[in-house]
Amino acid sequence: MPLHRTTSLIAALLAVLLPLAGCGAAAGPTARQAAPGYPRTVANCGLPTRVEAPPRRVVSLNQGSTEILLALGLGDRLAGTATWTDPVRPDLAEANARVPRLADNMPSFEAVLEAEPDFVTASFASTLGVGGVATRERFAEFGVPSYLSPADCVKDNSGGGDGRRGTPLTMETIYREIRELARLFGVEERGERLVSDLRGRLHRATAGLDASGVTLLYWFANSDSPYLAGCCGAPGIMTEAVGARNVFDDTHDEWPQISWETVAERDPDVLVIGDLTRRSQTAESAAAKIEFLESHPVTRDLDAVRHKRYVLLSGQAMNPTIRTVDGVEELASKLREFGLAR
């Protein structure tokens, strides 16, 4: 952020904290009496996340973490959200309408601090980490605890791109995020109800379904050098749930960029297409993607394109979020409709 604004923010903080320090240690913010049942701490991505009381002014830096908080009935605790790829899930729209949006994409560190957060959450280390809004250590310097989705913690983010997974992700990691956030906010029963609901929906969507022998390809964004799903992220959860196979299950990269010529060689039965509303890549919407597929000389002869076997999903369904269950439901329904599932 600009130096003069940084100086202003620090000066404002000192103006508040220095008088408190003069009143003795007992009046300081770290020595305040904890709320009943607090403090609470969870181990999170190698760091402790500790809160002295249920957070009341939360900034969620990614849509996925925002929708978990909204689903837990915590919309009134949100002081701001950012980094959206899709419209909010319809059943959460009313609660979300009252939450300030700091930015459609990644906000500045200054904008987040101006929302006066007492807690920060994020879905990705690319947002809450080096190169993102700020590191967790930087937020801690301002007395703001933070929480990063465990689904991103179990991924190797040390290289370029969207990271790499050594082992397949499962819904259990997403359930863990729900439960840990529910614990930090003191709404454990709501967390268990949400987990139970998601489990039930998964079971109902896939009961009696057998799509063995069916091959899938997941396209998130970009037509020039497309981001296609590797084996082991949220698309892996969906693929496993329906019993199909991802044609790029031989790569552990989360979203590798793969040529259309390689796609044509593997010729998937079904194309799972991200229907995004953001504007940061080429061919974000499903309509733009389908137009490209049906006109490009390499892709127009794909079996899935000739038979229009398209499954349209939100970007959030293709990331490790509560909407991954939406993705399983839609994929299972379409495979039955295409006559590819027994």
Image: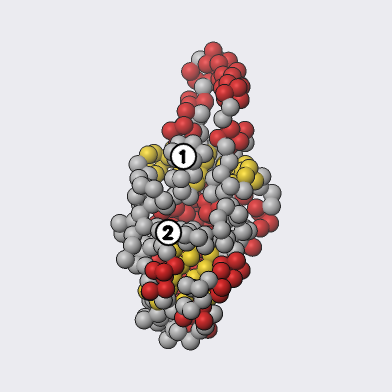
Task: In the displayed orientation, state which residue is furthest to the top.
Answer: 22
The numbered disc on residue 131 is 1
Which label belongs to residue 218? none
Real-space Cα separation, disc 2 to disc 1, in angstroms: 21 Å
| Circle 1 residues within 10 Å: few <14, some 14–19, many ≥20 | few
Mark closer to the chain start, 2 or 1: 1
User: In the rendered view of the protein, which quadrant contains the C terminus?
Assistant: bottom left
54 or 199, which is in the foreground?
199
Residue at 57% x, 60% y is: 284
- Front-lying residue, 186 or 309: 309
Looking at the image, the residue that sits furthest to the front is 297
Q: Amino acid at mark 1?
A: Gly
Residue underneath mark 2: 257
Q: Nearer the viewer, mark 2 or mark 1?
A: 2
Q: Amino acid at mark 2?
A: Gln
* Quarter assignment of residue 49: top left
Q: Left of 226 or right of it: where is 100?
A: right
